[in-house]
Image (cartoon, helix red, strand yellow):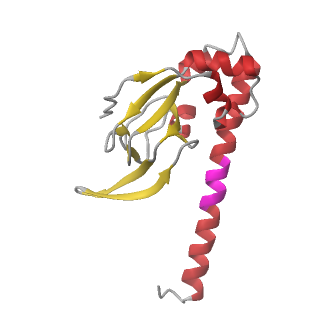
């Protein structure tokens, strides 16, 4: 259940330019993208999205911290990662529509802006370069996450094998 209880905010082109999505965008492209994104506030404890749900939304944190959480059985939940202002979340669901493998909840009052896949696709005919650059930004983020996970796996594997399975 998504609990977006706070009011919506207007996203300025400057906010887009300062986000990971705006890295390669011109000022005019940032202005155009700002017209199709929505923004909202989350109160501490609110869910941005639940594990197992599908959606086509990409979220960028503009203020506050979000906790990526995974259900481990019953009511037990473990924190996987803390996201901060400037981080993206929901990239894979945005790209391919698969179920979220984890939930995301606000650790503090937060503001996020959201881009829906249909809204980005509506810009393909008008400004294909903008769409291409946004998708490159998403892939860069996913690549950085994958690289970090690979390094963590190697470190964990080295720790276990050098300890001969004793940890």
Quadrant for the N terminus in the image: top left
Task: Report which quarter residue 129 is drawn in.
Answer: top right
Q: Is residue 91 left or right of residue 101?
A: right
Q: Is residue 73 left or right of residue 60?
A: left
- Residue shown at 50% from the left, 49% from the top: 83
- Residue shown at 55% from the left, 23% from the top: 11
**Quick one: which residue is furthest to the top in this view?**
126
> Quick one: 90 or 17, which is closer to the camera?
17
Magenta segment: 143-149
Q: How many marks?
A: 0
Task: Report which quarter residue 87 is drawn in.
Answer: top right
Residue 25 pos. (x, y %): 74, 26
On screen, 18 above or below 152?
A: above
Residue 9 pos. (x, y %): 46, 22
Q: Is residue 117 left or right of residue 70?
A: right
> Quick one: 100 or 140, which is closer to the camera?
140
Chief secondary structure of the magenta span? helix
- Residue shown at 71% from the left, 10% from the top: 126
The answer to whether residue 97 is magenta is no
Q: Is residue 95 left or right of residue 44?
A: right
Residue 156 pos. (x, y %): 56, 74
- Residue shown at 37% from the left, 23% from the top: 7
Task: Report which quarter residue 6 is drawn in.
Answer: top left
Residue 43 pos. (x, y %): 34, 38
**Quick one: which residue is furthest to the left in this view?**
74
The answer to whether residue 146 is magenta is yes
């Amino acid at each position: 259940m998504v609990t977006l209880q706070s009011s919506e905010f207007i996203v300025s082109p400057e906010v887009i330019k300062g986000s990971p999505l705006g890295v390669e965008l011109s000022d005019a492209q940032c202005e155009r993208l700002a017209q199709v994104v929505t923004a909202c506030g989350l109160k501490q404890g609110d869910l941005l999205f639940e594990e197992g749900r599908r959606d086509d939304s990409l979220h960028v944190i503009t203020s506050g911290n979000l906790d990526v959480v995974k259900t481990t059985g019953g009511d037990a939940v473990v924190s996987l990662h803390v996201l901060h202002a400037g981080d993206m979340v929901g990239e894979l669901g945005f790209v391919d529509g698969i179920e979220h493998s984890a939930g995301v909840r606000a650790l503090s009052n937060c503001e996020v802006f959201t881009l829906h896949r249909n809204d980005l696709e509506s810009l393909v005919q008008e400004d294909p370069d903008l769409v291409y650059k946004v998708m490159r930004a998403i892939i860069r983020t996913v690549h950085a996450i994958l690289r970090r996970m690979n390094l963590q796996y190697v470190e964990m594997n080295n720790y276990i094998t050098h300890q001969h399975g004793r940890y």
